[in-house]
Image: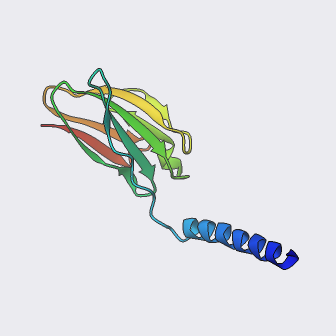
Amino acid sequence: MRYSLCAITVALALAGCEKNADKKRGAPPPPPAAPTVATDGTRSIPINVNDEGYDPAKIAAKPGEKLELVFTRLSKSACAEQVKVNDGPVTELPLEVPVKIAVTAPPSGEVRFACGMDMMTGVIVVN
């Protein structure tokens, strides 16, 4: 019985180490959740912020469509700590905490979003 308990403990510890090893080896970040639409017609779009940038980095929208961009920072990079949508204020992105930013698509054109350093960029394209 004692050996069984010890074997189970070792197996669980190794499983936990393997998960951490995957993270350190650069396992790909999880994909963002699927967009949803609220009862008022606002489309909520999850956006992961990882070491490669925004995922998705390009979002299609209809003219005048109300969007709720939900940024979740998964990267510890200083560049990913903030986001600015169009000419709006700079918004802080705490690690692994979803942050919602409301946007209304213009009649035509694009709405750009970028990190605080303007190195990572994304765009909402009105079609």
Toward the top, the furthest residue is 40
Toward the bottom, the furthest residue is 3
Looking at the image, residue 14 lies above or below residue 51:
below
Quadrant including the C terminus: top left
Q: Position of residue 48 (x, y in %)?
A: 42, 48
Residue placed most toward the observer, 48 or 91: 48
Looking at the image, residue 41 lies above or below residue 45:
above
In this image, 60 relative to 39: left or right?
Answer: left
Looking at the image, residue 54 lies above or below residue 18:
above
The colour mode here is rainbow
Toward the right, the furthest residue is 2
Looking at the image, residue 91 lies above or below residue 7:
above
Observer able to see residue 32:
yes
Q: Quadrant of residue 52?
A: bottom left
Residue placed most toward the observer, 17 or 24: 17
Residue at 55%, 69% in the rendered image:
22
Residue at 29%, 26% in the rendered image:
42
Quadrant including the N terminus: bottom right
Residue at 19%, 26% in the rendered image:
106
In this image, 116 relative to 125: left or right?
Answer: right
In this image, 126 relative to 48: left or right?
Answer: left
In this image, 21 relative to 42: left or right?
Answer: right
Residue at 45%, 58% in the rendered image:
29
Q: Quadrant of residue 126?
A: top left
Observer able to see residue 116:
no
Q: Position of residue 88 (x, y in %)?
A: 37, 26
Q: Quadrant of residue 43?
A: top left
Residue placed most toward the observer, 40 or 86: 40
